[in-house]
Each structure stands twice: as C-alpha cells, then as structure tokens.
Image (cartoon, rainbow, N blue to C red):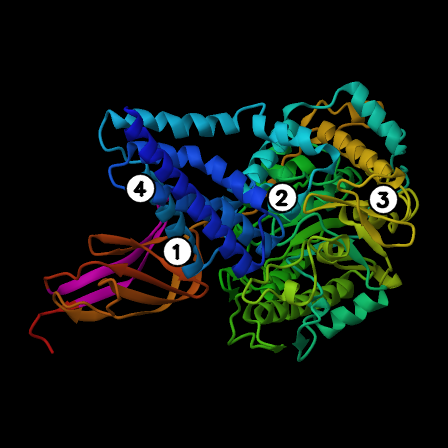
Amino acid sequence: MREGRFTAPLWWALAASAVPVVACALLALAWVDVGYSPWAIALDVLLVFPVVLGSALVARWHWQPWIAGTCLAALFVAGSAYKVAMMGAPLAPADAAAALELLQVLPGWRLVMALAAAVAWTGLLLLSLWPRNAARAAWLALPLLWTGLLMALPAPLPRLLHSLDGADAPQGSARLHAQGSIVYMLRAGAEYREEMAEVPTRGQVRAALTALGIQETTPAQASWTATRSIHVVLLESLWDARQLGAYRFSSPPMDPRFIAAWEAGGRSAVLSPVLGGATANAEFEFLCAMPALRASVAFDGALRNPVPCLPRILRDAGYGTVAIHPHVAGFWNRDVAYPLLGFAHYRPLGSFAMDDMDGMFLADASTFRQVVEWDAATQGGARFIWLVSLGSHYPYARDRNARPDLVQVTPSAPVLQDYANATRYTTAAFMDYVESVLTRQPDALIVAFGDHAPVLGTAPDPFAASGIDAGDAAGMVRLSTTPLLVIDGRNGVVDMGQLPLNQLAPRMLALLGEGHPVLPQAPWVRAPGTIGDERLFLNHLLHRKRDGSWQDCSGAAGSACDTVRKTRESLVTVRDDLIRGHQYALHLLGVRHTGPTRMEIARTFAPCMLEVKAWGPQQTAAGVPFNAQPDGHSAFWFSLREARGTPRLRFGDQEAPFTIAGKVASAGFASVPAQPGDYPITWICDDGNEGRIGDFRVLPATTP
C-alpha cells in the first residue's frame, strides 16, 4: 500500500477513535456524573485505535471506522460509567458470566431490549469490519493481533501500569477515572487470572493458619445433639432505604413488626461483599465463613472441592440440611455448588406452585407460606433451612391488584418507590414466616439479613442525591451495610452488632450452646475490634478502627492497614486451599473430611408447562389480521394460572415463542390462515410436554 493510501485511513481512524471516546466520556459525566481524567481518555483512545484502524484499512465504506469506534466507546466508556452508577463498580471480565445470569431474571420488555441491544451491537461491530475485498481482509489481522496481545498472559499493559503506580494504585471507580475503562478491564482480568493461576502450597497454608491464630479444631461434644431447628433467610436486596435523606417516605419501607424487632436487637447489621447483585457471593460468605472472591462468584467455577461449610458441619451433627430458592436450580451454578457445601436437599423453582407472582418471580408471601406448609408436613427432626427470597429482586415488579402501594416517596423517584414497596411486602411476609415457625418450634433459631444494597437507577440516582458516595470509606460502609435480625427462640432478639458477613455463621453457632458444631476455618472470628475486622467492598479494603469508624486501606500505609492486608491475604490463602486447592488446611488442623454430599433436588412440578385461564381473540375472518400489532403480526393474549420454562405456542402449522410477564402472556404470528375452519391452539415444550388450549375459528371471508 502506498504511503498516501495508508496515511488517509490512519488519520481517519484516529478521528473515529477519539471523537466517540470523548463524546462517550462527556455523556458519562453529564448523564451519570462519572468522570474520566484526560489521561484516561487518552488511554482509551490509544487502546481503541488499532481496532478502528483495522476497520479503516478494510473498509468498503467511509463510515465503517466510525461505527467501530462508536461501538467500542459505547461499550467500554459509557458502559463502565453506567455500571458504576448502577452498581458501584466498572465493567470487568467476570461480568460476562454475570450478564448471562442477568438475562434469566430480566422480565418482559427489559429482556427484549437487552437482547436487541446485544444483537445490534454485535451486528454493527461485525459490519464495521466487513472488508471491501479479499485482499483487504488481510488487514483484519491487525485488530485480531492487538486484541490477542492485550488479553495475553502475562498482560503487558496491566503489569506496566502496576509497576508505575505500585502500592498507590487507585481502586474501583477511582481506577476507572484515573486510567480509563479498557485499562480497568485489562487489569481486572489480569488480577483474576493471577488469583486463579496457582493453588497455595502446604507451607503457605501453614503460615496463613499461624497468622490467623487457627489451631486444631475441637469438634462438637458427643453429648451435643441437634434439637433446635435453624432457619436462615437471605432477604433479597434488603437495605434500610430511610438512609436516603433526600427522600421522604409516607410510611416505613419495612414492615413495622420487622422494624420493632430489628431495633430491639440494636439494629444489628452485616457488611456485604457486593452491591446490587452477585447474591451468590453473599451466600458463600455466610455459609462458609470465608471472604468472597474479589471479582467473580465462587459458585461459578472457583468452588471445586467439598468444603466444611455450615451445611456440612450441621449435617454431620445430625441436622437435615435444606437449601430453598424459588428460581431455576442452576442459577449461579447452585445445583453444583450446594452439594459441595454440604446440602443434602435442594428445593428450587420446580418444587413451588407458581400461584402468586410479582412480575416473573414468585411473591414472597407465597414462598414463605409454601415453605411453612412443606416444613410442617415433612418435619422429622432438627433442620437447617437456608432460604433465599426473590420478591424484592430488581426490577421490583408487583401484582398491584394483590399488593397495592403502601409507601409513597417524595420527591418522585419511581424505582425507589417500587423498591420501598417491595421491601415493605417482603419484610411483612418474612415476619409472618417468623410467627408461623415460632408457633411450631418455639426454640428455633431464626436469622435474616439482606444480601446487598439495591439497584435504584440513575434518573434520579437516590444514592447521589442523598450524599452517599461510593468513593469514600463512609459511603462504602453505608452501601455495604444491610439489616441483620437474629431471633434466639424463646430468648428473643439478639444484638449482634455490626459485623462482616463472613463472621456471622460462627457467631450464630455460638447461640446453640456449649459443645455446638464449629467451622474449622472460623476460629479467627473473635470479638469486634480484633483480628478480622476487614471488609473488601468495590475492590477497596476497609478496616474498622478502634473507635468504630472505618478506614479505606487501599493504597494507605500504616501498621493498622498493613495488619489488615496480611489478615486478608491469610484468609484468601485458606479459602483458596479449601475451595480449589489441595485442602492442606484440613490435614494441618486434624479435621476429618466427610467427602462429597449427594444432594436430592426436589422437582414437584414439570420444568416446562403452561396453564391458561382465559385467552383471545378466538376468531377472525379468513386472511384478516386479529389483534394487529405495530409490526404487522397478529397476537393472542393469555391469562395464566401458571407458567414454567420456555413453552412455545403452536397455531395450526405455525409456532411462536410466548412472551410471559407474571400471569399474562402473548404470542404473535405473521400470517392468518386463508381457509375457514377450526385451528388448534396448543403449547409445546422442548422436553415433549404439551397441552391443548382450545380452537381458533377462522370464518369465511364474507362473514361480518
């Protein structure tokens, strides 16, 4: 290629890289108040440029490099800023797995929009790299080689930047501001691969146990027997919205009974490792008394060994161990992770009657009622019940006929109002559950906590409006802190103080009395203010000082921060050894390993089915569209009693997917039969399950 033919695409690509990146950076600042430094913008332009240059060199049309630059800037620059505004952290490689999980919980039009956006982005990026001819296609090697270089191990750019900023490296959104979205992604990916590359050696595990002061574990006394059932409920997205000082609530966003019990227990609280999502990380911390992974979910690949977590040690002590979650069994890989933790039984979506829906989720009132009925009907001894609720899950949809608004929010904030009402109904359903359990089991130990603070949107952003800043220690602690309620049977509510979530299980076990089962990895958990008072949140290492306040140790020097870093490193070493290593810790501590657990998954109902109460339209004239939609399709509507899985609608010899939102559904067809007659309407599933709905009548064309 002659020099002139190369320099033109070069300058064209530079412009097509810089303009979209700068535009998206300005949009992020104006839209969600997330800023990028000039150096960060320059780095993003530099890292986008080789891909855009490849597009310019192969381009059939002049606008192709502009499409490439816009696609990349929208994903990395605007996308990272939006995720910071919604969930406190920029985009990271681990979000790819989280995105697949997210698609399973998005209802109706949100799912359609998400899929359409993903397909449109992919299509546009591929179009931007469409070569003019076969000879030009060779230039596609440039973006491919550049992408491979950035993803290679060891990743050169992250290592270079780490060597430049060392211990003072900015964390979380501060790193995004300082070094840009693509560098953040690269560094997060390199840190994750580095974290997962090796398993601890025996010497490293021995040193970590010594640093934590963990000695050989004393097992439960032989005289100790499982007599008191334990009910632990993870309340989805439960957080005290009354902290949002910019807003007024017409009535409390939690049930008055819950508030009274919570205040009687000193407003106890846990500090969650996550914000807005990744519930399974909160599950892991509680159940295993170990810190969650830094940038991914332990259940989703890192957990490979049977581990002495709470279900296992309680099962060995004579408890029936049951996990309950009214959702798809494999969500967050729970059907694989739960038996590794020691659960013997799992009751997922297929064990629930979907008789009362809030959006696409079973309402908590129905969830708790069905659990009480099942527990009462099958009780045969002390149980450890682990229940993960869903009624207050984003986007906080509700059946407003059954559950009208009880809380009004001023000034207007629609997402916050939906959230406040969701938690009001969730906590009411939970307190009904508590009363039912204590009526039958007055000595039961009941624990409930929120897994993380909620997603509240950006228009407006209630956190920012209320001065809660995810960039300082005080703001991070407020976002990390969720309510904790512990009811010790007849003894009533217990004040547990404020503690990191991975310290809750051993303190809960202590309430069972002398000789109680113990978690072998948890003797490091002691009184507040001693070793272990650390919380990794949004990639910031927080340390609780002796006066009760919290300090951000990310990049900070000093003996206290040095100690908490070493504590964190030791905990991570023990965790990695247990969940994916050689489990030297068990041998060093003299812990008898019981091996894998065979877990029974309850499947009372078919995984895919449909039960229709009413439907329509039920007739039309030959060739005449019915219930016409904007895209020209004719659509059926359905009122449902129940729906599971992904059934399809068969209309004559045509098939179409259902769009299901709670108790209503629809399906559209491009054509209407031209011949009069009765055409069967049926639903079908991939597993062969099917059912008849009725007949659709097509009248002669001359029929009025």
Q: Is residue 454 left or right of residue 630?
A: right
The magenta stretch is: 676-697
Tell me which amino acid carries mark 4: Gln
Dot 3 or dot 1: first in sequence order is 1
Label 1: few (<14), some (14–19) or many (≥20) C-alpha neighbours in 10 Å: some
Residue at mark 3 to residue at mark 1: CA–CA distance? 52 Å
Mark 2 Cα shell of 10 Å, populated few (<14), some (14-19), many (≥20): many
Mark 4 surroundings: few (<14), some (14-19) or many (≥20) residues within 10 A: many
Whichever of labels 4 and 1 marks the residue nearer the N terminus, that label is 4
Under mark 2, the amino acid is: Ala
Q: Secondary structure at mark 2?
A: helix
Q: Which residue is mark 4?
A: 64
Q: Nearer the viewer, residue 312 or 139?
A: 139
Residue receiving disc 3: 225
| Amino acid type, residue under disc 3 in the picture | Thr
Foreground: disc 3 or disc 1: 1
- Give the quarter of the figure containing the N terminus: top left
The disc labelled 1 sits on which kind of residue? Answer: Val
- Counting from the top left corner in percent of width and height, residue 340 is at 66, 35
Q: Which residue is mark 2?
A: 178
Packing grade of label 3 (10 A; few <14, some 14-19, many >=20) is some
Extreme residue toward the front, this view: 4
Name the spot of residue 183 as percent of width and height, x first: 57, 37
Mark with earlier residue (1, 2):
1
